[in-house]
Image: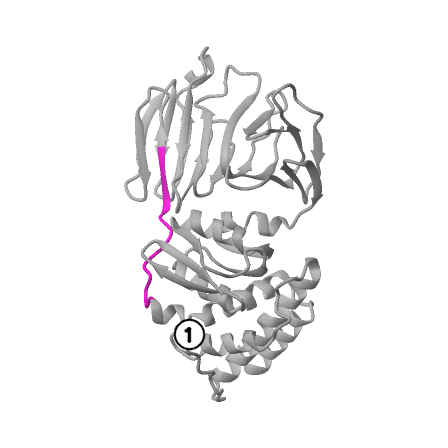
Amino acid sequence: MELNEIHNLLDKYNNGQANDDEKAYVESWYLAQGDSTQFPQARDLLEDFFNSRKILHMHMHGKQSLVLLRRIIAGAAIVILCLSIGYYWHLRVTSRPTLKEQVVKSGIKPVGNKASLLLSNGKRIQLEDGKSGAVAEEAGIKIIKKANGQLVYEAIGGRASDLKNVLYNTIETPRGGQYQVNLPDGTKVWLNAGTVFRYPVCFGVAKERRVELTGEGYFEVAKDKRHPFIVHSPAQEVEVLGTHFNINAYIEEPAVKTTLVEGSVSVYTLNKKNVLNPVLLKPGQQAVLDTHGLVVHEADTEQEIAWKNGVFLFNDEPLELIMRRISRWYDVDIEYQGGDRKQLYGGGVSRYENVSKVLEKLELLGGIHFKIEGRRIYVMK
């Protein structure tokens, strides 16, 4: 791409006129250049660029913050571009060591495709990257492990529909792990780190397709009007016929969030005495259930399912929430020695980076500093 074409593309991005492909190109190029070994000064330059602008992305909300973030990214990309074609920038000298100086290579990466499968007979099978093939057979269903982190349930010659007793399997992803389950009805479920998912081996004899989730999962439910698909999670149930949605129901989080991407779902809140009236969600809406009740609002669906697509995407989120996500995905412990836990940050980075790279990108936004010792991250001002 010629220099004038790059400038035109960045201008379109900065002015909000870029299409989805152009936006993706600019953002991926920016993230890649931040780690470029070809231009080793780029990261220090970016730090100066962000630190010199106190408006930043913090303490701002909604569309205004997204526009600002795009301007900052575009500006940073232009500056790096200038550096790459020969401009000189006077780098700020700081007494505080950078993360790269503390830990040249932290070595802390997410585990990847890893989970354990508990069969109905009590046998536990470890699922990791590597050899694929059939791992078990239960109730006329063959359970097959694929090489790309998928567990597939396939009926053997129609025998599964003759079952009279419902048998359950449970798959559990550790901190730092993820997995995908393809159920025998055609439903696909992506499981985030630190998640427990319990489901029938076969739905054949039941009037409804009922599963249980604690943690986070993205569902693409196969359509079946005669058999509703119901997901039970702490304090709520979600009922669908066929749709795409995400549920975030970690025990350590203050709320259960259900985000609808496609179709429609009914969200039922539960208490010890009865089931309350359902709330119907439309695509692009999110139901948030906490101790104060259930609230529905418009959602940033791209952000909510970014984890499934291999991206950390934050839009005005408090530091403590971001650090909990990092803790689960990288299997690290977090200790606060300073910094404002409620301060809001925004941005995006690949989930497959080393944890030190993710933290460096947060530091660029200012107001926070990190130190890594073993599998513990210290948060400092």
Instruction: Report the front residue among 172 and 199.
Output: 172
Figure check: 356 above or below 44: above
Q: Is 251 covered by the magenta stretch?
A: no
At label 1, the amino acid type is Arg
- Quarter-of-image position of residue 237: top right
Residue closest to the far front = 337
At 31% across and 56% down in the image, what residue appears? 374
Q: Crowding near pointer 1: few (<14 within 10 Å), some, many (20+)?
A: few
> What's the image's color scheme?
one colour
The dominant secondary structure in magenta is: loop
Specify whether 275 is left or right of 183: right
At 40% across and 71% down in the image, what residue appears? 98
Instruction: Report the front residue among 362 and 94.
Output: 94
Picture coordinates of residue 63, whole percent (x, y): 70, 60
At 50% across and 64% down in the image, what residue appears? 362
Is residue 353 visible in this depiction of the protein? no
Residue closest to the far left = 131
At 43% across and 54% down in the image, what residue appears? 335
Specify whether 272 is left or right of 136: right
Q: Is 115 covered by the magenta stretch?
A: yes
Picture coordinates of residue 293, whole percent (x, y): 68, 34
Q: Secondary structure at mark 1?
A: loop
Figure check: 169 above or below 28: above
Picture coordinates of residue 283, whole percent (x, y): 68, 42
Instruction: Report the front residue among 2 and 117.
Output: 117
Tell me where the magenta segment starts and ends, as one range.
103-116
Figure check: 113 above or below 89: above
Specify whether 202 is left or right of 228: left
Figure check: 57 above or below 328: below
Picture coordinates of residue 34, whole percent (x, y): 46, 71
Residue annotated with mark 1: 96
- Quarter-of-image position of residue 52: bottom right
